[in-house]
Image: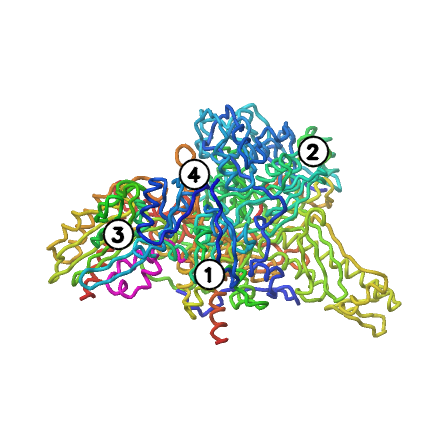
Amino acid sequence: MQWFDYARPRTLDEAAKLLAEHGDRARILAGGTDILVQLRAGARAAEMVIDVKDIPELNEIHWDGSTGLTLGAAVPCYRIYGNADIKQHYAGIIDVASLIGGTQIQGRASLGGNLCNSAPSADAIPLMIVLGATCRIVGPSGERTVAVEDFCTAPGKNILQAAELLVSIHFPAPKPNSGAHYMRFIPRNEMDIAVAGAGVSVVLENGNFASARVALASVAPTPLFVKEAGEALAGQPVNDESIARAAAIAKNAAKPIDDMRGTVRYRKHLCEVLTRRALQVAVQRAKGSN
Amino acid sequence: MPTVFIPGSMRELSAGQAEIEVRGSTVREIISELDRSHPGIKDWLVEDNRLKPNISVAVDGVVSPVGLLQDVAEDSEVHFVAAIAGGRS
Amino acid sequence: MSTQNYEPNMVLSTTEFDVIGTRPVRHDGADKVTGRALYGADIELAGLIHGAILRSPHAHARIKSIDTSKAEAHPAVKAVVTSADLPDAGDEIIDLGEGATPLKYLRGNVLASGKVLYKGHAIAAVAANSLHDAQEALKLIKIEYEVLPPTLTAPDAMRDGAPILHEGLKTTELGKPTDKVSNVASHFQHVKGDIAAGFAEADLVIEREFNTATVHQGYIEPHNTTVLWNNDGRVQVWCSSQGAFAIRDTTAAILEVPVSQVKVTPMEIGGGFGGKIPVYLEPVAAVLSKKSGHPVKIVMSRADEFEATGPTPGSCIRVKIGVKNDGKMVAAQAWMAYEAGAYPGAMIVPGSMCVFAAYDIENIVIDGFDVVVNKPSTAAYRAPGATNAAFATESIVDEIAEKLGIDPLDLRLRNAATKGTRRADGPKYPRIGCVELLEAMKNHPHYNAPLEGPNRGRGVAIGFWFNAGLPSSCSMSVNADGTVMLIEGSPDIGGTRTSIAMQAAEVLGIAAEDVRPTVADTDSVGFTAVTGGSRVTFATGIAAIKAARDLRDQMIQRVARIWDVKSEDVEFEKGVFMSSNGTKNSISFKDLAKQLTSTGGPIVGRAAINPPGVGGSFSGNIADVEVDPETGKVTILRFTAFQDAGKAIHPSYVEGQMQGGSVQGIGWALNEEYFMNPEGKMMNSSLLDYRMPTSLDLPMIDTVIIEVPNPGHPYGVRGVGEANIVPPPAALANAIYHAVGVRMDRLPMNPVAVMEAIWKKEGVPA
Amino acid sequence: MPRKVQVQTKINGEDVEFLCEPRQSLLEALRDIVGLTGAKEGCNDGNCGACTVLFDGRIVTSCLVLAVEAEGKQITTIEGVAMGNELHPIQQCFLEGAALQCGICTPGIIVAAKALLDQDTNPSEEKIRLWLANNLCRCTGYDKIVRSVQAAAGRMQEAR
């Protein structure tokens, strides 16, 4: 591996200074489960690695019944699924925190890292999209908030500018009678990259869908928000037909490629199956919530 | 007398015969005897006074670890087979 | 599924012994559970520097120039080598007891000259103070290539006009050299009976083509070596390999030094499965050491493992079987093309000898083709060649059973090979256990348990592997405390120190723990062939038995001298020497051990053998699966492995071989493959994307050990390392068929492939 | 030339100081600098689990941790699992249950299994299989590993 220097700032200001100094030659280290692999393989380069795990804002888990959940960008998966508030209010987040990697990886990897790595196959991103999550980003020109669905721009690329840092991800408080689920398909049962994945959220009202959101993994250059699939459910009764229609829309929206993980035809088919199955779980969760 | 089985690829040397009874008490003797009646067989099988590396001899179904030195009984069956390469776990 | 009212691990034992058949803790166990055992990469020497290898980015290219000057100028670099630093191999052929190989192929694979033949082909190497520095220095080597089109599968490489890998490679046709330059290194044939008459007699003929992907052994420890080319000219090697002598002899041949100038110390080895027999790193590290004056360590990366070591061949196999309505097979034909990778030597010979090995069929023709392609040069992998072949044959046998309405095990029993069955390649079988295996499968609770629920199915299949003999050496000495030191030369990959020591202990009537086995270096033990071919417990076991008998006989003579009786009048049983001439003398092994020094001196037993009497092993599986008809994903619900061990010396480690081999077969069946892009780059060369089974992908693997003793071994051992990998792909293919009605003809049967087969069956348009 | 970094940490209960390059992984530091070669390198990208160690009480693949991150942390490697001269029940059960063949994955699996049994005294087969899914074993098919972890759980409960 190429030589790099290492710094472990304790405040956002210190981190900002380091980022300003090194620009795009700096890399952020949180869990390291993607960046260290990429640096070793020469897929990314760095002259300075900035370890953000000592910065309080990137490590917080803050739940508030009215405003929702703020999740520090570096909070590792095991802290997420070990948190009682998240368990109670965001079953979908528990889904993805338990899916990413194996036990060892979950001791290090974070949802913020999953987002910043911006892989088309990222399991957490579709779920964050359907939960309406937003990113708090700080940089040389101040602070900004960006919806997760607008974050990724291409495989491995995102809207973060040089010297910008993802601080936290904010999830709105779940509405009554709502549920979410993320389901991916992998050939093994663990330690695998999604061939396709579907994140869904639903809000129910009097036996109908009040609203819904659908997003897909691994079937486009970025995690894919399929707005029209959710819109097609709004106001519709909760039944197999409406769910099938939304699933068909998801299938048509997918623009996958042929590669070692699957073919175009197979992945589009999976989008239908996974969207349908994920919606069924989300509906059950919504019925069980209050 | 021991019976030698001639593989398909050698049969032009044996005038098409698939089985030949040959006198001999070792594989070396049998090959020499065969070569007398069917010249060329020895060159096909033997090099530097040993079986060629890609050829094994099986006597009564058991591949011999000693090749030309293998003893052969009166009622033995002798086969020349391809040596198994690798075969390791 | 596993509400068990049966034993998950059964031993159908036919003979009882004192030590053999028990389950002692392995001798190297404590070191291996505490992290103290030293594997190849764990070695540290004074002045050690680190090597790294530059590998081809192209699957097929001519090397126009290599410029190493900038790397040589790097301050941390101690040496740079290319193929120009290895002696010219000429046309020499070397025989390493593994079949003959032209030396130029071995050398060309170690460092390419002229052409690169696969992506990952080694071209140059650098040694530097640290591994990071060596890797950085590789980037300073400049190579100009003329990129050539690659050919990546056997059928493609065999077509007219295919890119030619070796301009000097001429096809050997039915044993005869020809002038035809092609990628087919050889075409050979096995013929038995009259094939045309056989098929004419058949009531039902089924013919299908099967394709299998290249797969890797997947051992967790990467190849590694540390070499010191000492000032006295001796080359010292520390490495993990399946055979220290094989490494010694190959390294000496490539370096053109006498074998006595190379000493190989076998370190603990982290898995091999056939893949750690070839030499890749030792000659490179040796010349780096010679140039730098330092010991040099090289460890492969995981990507190197996939791209530059020897996987097992991908294959294209056409099988045609004819049967009578009563199920009797009357004719069988196979056309088999195996991918050798970059250099000739696919495992097609054993594959062709195994394709119909389980059955007694009167009329057979088998055509085999050894085909070079632009992939890494293949190596052995657990019963090499046999798994591909059994996938084809056993799938067709299942189809025949279905069409004829015969139970699939009954159909196999109807045709099972037995003692005296003539194989297609000529010889008759000695005593084998195919029938006993099939009967054990038929009688097992698993086969008779109901399997309910939609999309579930049960499949069976069987497989055969020859096993191997080959030379082994062993010596033993007696300690004054009554224990015995055993020196042998078989690297211990799965508990063979213990299975060898147990056989010696059985002879000597002492406990397994009282025999202390050591795997010695090539200076310290007689020649011993590789740990492979399921041979160690058989062949090195016989060496240990003979050495122990030698020891025992010398001790009998000593006792006779002490008692002043004739040695014929001394008996030895269960560790006690007794006189049998009326006097009532007796002394235990331990008590006699104390007296050796004062009664004539120490005693050493020894044996060096090349045993005949190898016993082949049959194995079988019963597999229950559930297929998700919407995703094509296969879940294994229950899996039982059966194998004829001859005699299980240490049943726990026999079960372990069966379970491990089964799971490798399951991985091969369902997900593992080299996924190549059209340019010949492997796209999934990591353990994330090359999907070997994890613990979560499997049920418990139940086992049944069958014991049909091999008459060629004193205790009946056959060897159990390999046959177990042969049946799983076919068993799972058959189970998938019975679950969702699709016949799979391609490995891996991954979700995409199963889904496409389901779509095809249901007529869903693409 | 950039400078090496001094790291103060605690390994298997002992204070340890070492000097490393920032680019070196914890696995490299343990093996090549500290001399603890029990953790093995099988893939160097977090997928095989052979380098598993406890890092502040949680299992991590040490190839995906920088050595400099060890500053102020508590690390347990396979060398720290046995209790003095006495094997840990997991180690003992692995030996009795023949849960290892080549043994290269064994250190990582024992460390991972210890972390599991420290938090769950009676895990189900399914839980063990899920927990160990990041630890590849190519020899055993996992059967005897899972059974030996179950046996160790039982033995540890008896000892309580």
Could you confirm whether marks 4 and 2 are on the same chain? no
- Residue hosting label 3: A274
User: Which residue type carries mark 2?
Assistant: Val
Provide the chain ID for the residue under circle 1. Answer: D
Asked if labels 1 and 2 share a chain, the reply is no
Give the Cα separation between the discs numbered 2 and 3: 65 Å
Q: Chain of mark 2?
A: B
Quadrant of the image containing the C terminus of chain A:
bottom left
Callout 4: SS: loop
Label 2's element?
strand
Asked where in the image residue B33 lies, by quadrant, the reply is top right
Query: Gap between marks 4 and 1, in whole Å?
Result: 40 Å
Asked if residue A95 lies in the magenta stretch, the reply is yes
Q: Are marks 1 and 3 on the same chain?
A: no
Q: Which mark is residue B46?
A: 2
Residue A45 placed where, x, y %? 39, 40
Tell me the tag on residue D74: 1
A156 or C240: which is nearer to us? A156
Residue type of the residue flagged with mark 4: Met
Q: Position of residue B68 (x, y in %)?
A: 72, 39
Question: Which mark lies nearer to you, 4 or 3?
Answer: 4
Is disc 1 on the same chain as disc 4?
no
In the foreground, C123 or D145: C123
Q: Residue drawn at (53%, 49%), measured in percent from left and top?
A: C221
Q: Which residues are magenta?
A: A76-103
